[in-house]
Every structure is written in structure tokens, then in C-alpha cells.
């Protein structure tokens, strides 16, 4: 169930990232496209506006030619230029309305100025058709120039307004992207926390199952194989008494009893490793003190244990893992490091800190990830530390001893129920 939830949460995180990326890139592309289209429209507006003035100016030149030379074609040409200028005005009106997002006062003003330009050109056309007074026509041309000057001002203001509107829309889009980014980050953080919680639950349940199985196997070994080995030892002693007068048989029976005793001790050691019985009677500090006393009695390693600054109260399942880590470190010093001294320090409250060092032969800590150089003991330690969400720092060099620092937060290893 946890694995399926894990997969679903990862899918949700990916979906959030994809949606955010799609919206952000879509918004940016749309903004650039709209900005480019608006710039092109402004350029066309300016070009069309210039053509309006040019055509009216051409009409005035042709009219002057008619007045001076009295060529009928010049009068027709001036009328054609005026009609062409009116068509340009219609094009400009259409372009303004095509890019409309909402009707503004500036848009109304520029359309009104265009309407006056169109009306003034129509007046010029009528006067040219009924030509009878050159002064009146010149006055109409001057009026057109005045109207066109007003129109140019309106066009400038209109372009500034549309650019300002575009900037506002870009700002709103960026603000929306920022808000979506914040929401996406909050969702990702929430989903990540759920993912961490699920992984922690998975580790916790794994630890529960592992500890439960260890206890079951330890009980089966104790009740089954342990009882059989004890029975073999007892029957060996009984038979030894019966074969006192047969030295050869007596020697073999004593060997059987010795081997059964060694086998029983080995089974008890395996049982203790699977389920440290000392933790059932003592807390972690007391159990480590007991282990220290047992190690020091062997005379091979002088072990000191300091738990004076340990004030945290880990759950029993966590104590088992910490005890096994410490036991594994001590066994490495005994079996592989050839150390004569070792020091174990436990301290902390919510964050537990373990420091262990020995004066053994050491190894190259740069090859810690190499299973051949690291050894199974060290790999077991790193696996156990990972299972409780801890961090470790190892310092060692050949001939310079061994040092390890382990840190983990017992708040990250909360259990709803203790391991039964």
C-alpha cells in the first residue's frame, strides 16, 4: 500500500511541475507573440497614416498643376488621390478596431479624428467637382492639415496607451505565474512531506516486521535447536557416567558434550544478536555498560562507554538498532582492527549523537563504498544508520585508527505502537 501511495505522490509532483511549466511557457510565448503582433500593427498604422497625408498632398499638387496649366488629367488625378486617402483611413479604422480589447477614451478620440479627416477629404472632393473658388479649396486643404496634426497626436497617444496596456497585461501575467509558482511550491512541499512520511512509515513498518521476525526466529531457535542441544549435552553426560570403564567411548562422549556446549553457546550468541535479551531488562545505557563489562573481561580490548549526556528516550525498536550498531562497531575493533583501546560516547536529547573510535589498523575511508574494502560489518552499520534516517561521518587511514560519528533525530523515528 505504501509503495502504491509513493508512486501516486510522485505522479502528482510530476503533474504539478508539468502544469506549471506548461502555463509559464505558454504565457511567455503568448506574450512575446502578442507583443510582436502589436508592434507590427503600430508600424502599419504609422505607415498608413503617412500615406493618407502623402495622397492628400499629391492631390493638392495635381490641383495646382490644373490651376497653372489647365490640364484636365491633373484634376482627375487629384480626385483619385483623395479617394485613395479615404481608403487608407478606412484601413486604419479597421486596424484599430481589430486589436480592440476594450473601448478606451483614447480609441474613441482617434476614431473621431479619423472621421473628421474623412469628412474633410469628402469636402475637398465636392469642392474639386464644383470647382469655382481656388481660395476656398486652399482653406479646405489647410483645415485638413490641422485635422491631420490633431490625428497624429491622437495616434501617438493611442500607441502609448496600447503599449502601456500591454505592459499591464505582462505584469498581470508575471504576477499570475509567480502566484502559481508559490502554489506549486507549496503543493510540492506538501506532497514531498507526504512522500517522506510514507517512506518513514515504510521504514517503520519494515523495522517492526524485521524485529518481530527476529524475535520469532530467536524464540524458535531457543525453544527448538537450543532445547535439542541442551538435551544432547545432558544425554552425553549421562552416557559418560555409564561408560566410565571404557576410556575410548568416554573420550568421544566428552567430545560430543563439548561440541554440543559450543553449539549451544553459538546459538545463544545468534539469539542475542537477533533479539538482545539485555534490552528487555535494562535501558540502552545500562545495556551498553553490561556489554562493555563483558568485552573488557575478555582482555583483548579496553572499551570505555560514556552515556552521561544521553537524556533522550528512544523507543525500544530504536534502542535495538543503536545497540546493534554499537555492537557491530565493537566487533569490528575486536575481529578486524586489532585494536587495544576503544571509546564509545552517546549524547543528546532529541538528536542522538554517537561517537566511536579505536586505535586499530584503520583503513582507507575513501573506499568506504567498496564492499570488498569496507567489509560486511561496516556495510551492516551503514544500512542500519540509513534505516533510522541518520547521517554518518567516517575518518580513518591505514595505521591511524578508526573514528565514526553518527547523528540521527529520534523525532523522525516515531512509532504509533511499540514492536511487540
Image (cartoon, rainbow, N blue to C red):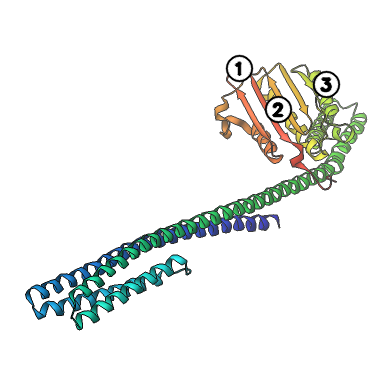
Circle 2 sits in a helix, a strand or a loop, which is it?
helix
Total of numbered circles in the picture?
3
Q: CA distance from mark 2 to mark 3?
A: 16 Å
Please give left or right for residue 374 compared with residue 114 in the image: right
Say if 250 sits above or below 417 in the image.
Answer: above
Hey, which residue is sitting farthest left in the picture? Answer: 69
Q: CA distance from mark 2 to mark 1?
A: 16 Å
Q: Position of residue 359 (x, y in %)?
A: 67, 17
Disc 1 marks which residue? 400
**Residue 135 as seen in the image, left or right of residue 292:** left
In the drawing, what numbered circle is on residue 293? 3
Give the residue displayed 64% in from the left and 22% down from the top. 402
**Badge number at residue 329:** 2
- The x and y percentages for residue 47 are 27, 64
Are dots 2 and 3 in contact, CB under 8 Å?
no
Q: Residue at x 27, y 66 (%)?
A: 145
* Residue 392 % position (x, y): 65, 31
Residue 186 position (above or below residue 237): below
Badge 2 crowding class, 10 Å Cα cut-off, few under 14, some 14 to 19, many 20 or more, is: many
Amino acid at each position: 500500500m505504501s509503495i502504491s501511495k509513493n508512486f501516486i505522490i510522485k505522479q502528482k509532483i510530476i503533474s504539478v511541475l508539468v502544469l506549471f511549466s506548461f502555463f509559464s511557457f505558454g504565457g511567455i510565448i503568448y506574450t512575446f507573440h502578442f507583443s510582436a503582433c502589436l508592434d507590427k500593427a503600430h508600424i502599419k498604422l504609422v505607415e498608413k497614416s503617412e500615406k493618407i497625408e502623402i495622397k492628400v498632398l499629391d492631390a493638392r499638387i495635381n490641383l495646382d498643376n490644373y490651376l497653372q496649366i489647365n490640364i484636365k488629367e491633373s484634376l482627375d488625378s487629384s480626385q483619385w488621390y483623395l479617394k485613395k486617402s479615404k481608403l487608407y483611413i478606412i484601413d486604419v479604422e479597421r486596424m484599430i478596431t481589430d486589436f480592440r480589447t476594450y473601448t478606451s477614451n483614447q480609441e474613441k478620440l482617434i476614431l473621431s479624428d479619423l472621421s473628421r479627416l474623412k469628412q474633410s477629404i469628402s469636402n475637398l472632393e465636392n469642392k474639386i467637382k464644383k470647382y469655382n473658388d481656388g481660395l476656398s479649396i486652399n482653406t479646405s486643404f489647410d483645415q485638413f492639415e490641422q485635422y491631420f496634426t490633431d490625428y497624429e497626436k491622437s495616434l501617438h497617444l493611442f500607441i502609448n496607451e496600447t503599449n502601456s496596456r500591454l505592459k499591464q497585461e505582462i505584469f498581470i501575467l508575471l504576477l499570475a505565474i509567480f502566484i502559481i509558482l508559490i502554489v506549486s511550491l507549496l503543493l510540492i512541499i506538501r506532497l514531498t512531506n507526504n512522500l517522506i512520511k510514507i517512506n518513514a512509515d515504510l521504514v517503520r513498518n519494515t523495522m517492526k516486521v524485521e524485529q518481530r521476525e527476529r524475535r520469532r526466529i530467536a524464540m524458535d531457535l531457543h525453544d527448538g535447536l537450543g532445547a535439542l542441544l541442551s538435551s544432547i549435552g545432558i544425554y552425553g553426560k549421562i552416557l559418560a557416567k555409564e561408560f566410565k570403564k571404557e576410556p575410548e567411548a568416554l573420550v568421544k562422549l566428552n567430545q560430543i558434550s563439548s561440541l554440543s556446549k559450543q553449539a549451544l553457546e553459538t546459538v545463544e550468541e545468534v539469539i542475542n544478536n537477533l533479539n538482545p535479551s539485555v534490552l528487555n531488562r535494562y535501558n540502552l545505557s545500562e545495556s551498553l555498560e553490561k556489554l562493555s563489562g563483558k568485552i573488557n573481561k575478555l582482555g583483548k580490548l579496553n572499551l570505555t562507554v560514556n552515556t552521561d549526556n544521553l537524556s533522550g528516550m528512544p523507543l525500544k525498536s530504536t534502542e535495538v538498532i543503536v545497540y546493534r550498531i554499537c555492537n557491530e562497531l565493537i566487533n569490528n575493533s575486536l575481529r578486524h582492527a586489532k585494536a587495544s583501546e576503544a571509546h564509545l560516547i552517546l549524547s543528546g536529547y532529541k538528536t542522538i549523537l554517537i561517537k566511536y573510535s579505536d586505535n586499530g589498523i584503520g583503513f582507507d575511508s575513501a573506499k568506504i563504498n567498496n564492499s570488498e574494502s569496507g567489509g560486511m560489518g561496516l556495510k551492516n552499520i551503514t544500512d542500519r544508520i540509513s534505516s533510522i534516517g541518520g547521517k554518518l561521518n567516517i575518518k580513518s587511514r591505514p595505521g591511524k585508527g578508526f573514528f565514526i560519528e553518527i547523528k540521527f533525530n529520534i523525532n523522525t523515528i516515531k512509532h504509533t505502537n511499540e514492536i511487540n
